[in-house]
Amino acid sequence: MFTENVVLNFCFMSDPDAYSEDIGRPIRKFTAKDLNAALGIKATFHFDAGEHNFLSGHGNAQFSFWTVAFQLSPDEVSRIEYNTDEAIACLMNKLQGFLNENGITAEQIKEVTRTFDCRALVMLNLPKWMDGGIFAVHPDDLGFMSETGLTFEHWPFRKEQIETLKRSGIA
């Protein structure tokens, strides 16, 4: 089924070095250790500035990336089948439950973005082979993201990238 390859991430991405000219000082980049401590949880996947750039697939990154990745369970995949909208709604529900269970608040998220030059994101990864993929994000989920200071971004990923996140993710 297609929905087994849908991944939703709660993530932080630091600004690249190139932005330092705009702000007149060096970029304050986080490490995975910094965010694990600030949020009281461990990333399911990360890379620090200077390490291999997982997102582009080549070279060393000029920014840091930290994520907790969510995927559907086999039962959810069977139930949802090809309904991308329902898959996203289910994953958003998992994300909200995860933040609540771990006591992660909007204030903590905002504090991380104030301490480091970074963005807090809900990143949806759909496979590149979908040729764009059409999906909707429900109004309740948009409200949740707005309340917690999370920006929504869609990043189509190659099959290998999807598999890496799935191996490290939370079902």
Image: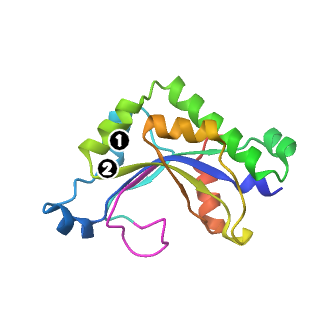
Q: Are marks 1 and 2 in contact (CB under 8 Å)?
A: yes
Q: Which mark is residue 35?
A: 1
- Who's the residue at 44% across and 52% down the image? 46
- Residue 11 covered by magenta stretch: no
Image: 153 above or below 95: below
Where the C terminus falls, by quadrant?
Answer: top right
Amino acid bearing label 1: Leu
Please name whichever residue, 112 or 142, is drawn nearer the observer in this view of the structure: 142
Q: Is residue 69 left or right of residue 119?
A: right
- Position of residue 96 measured from the top left corner of the image (x, y, whole percent): 57, 32
- Residue 60 covered by magenta stretch: yes
Magenta region: 52-66
Image: 89 above or below 156: above
Please name whichever residue, 42 or 64, is drawn nearer the observer in this view of the structure: 64
- Per the image, the residue denoted by label 2 is 31
Where the N terminus falls, by quadrant?
Answer: bottom right
- Who's the residue at 72% across and 64% down the image? 133
Magenta region, main secondary structure:
loop
- Position of residue 110 measured from the top left corner of the image (x, y, whole percent): 34, 38
Amino acid bearing label 2: Thr
Circle 2: element type: loop
Q: Which mark is residue 11?
A: none
- Who's the residue at 86% across and 41% down the image? 79
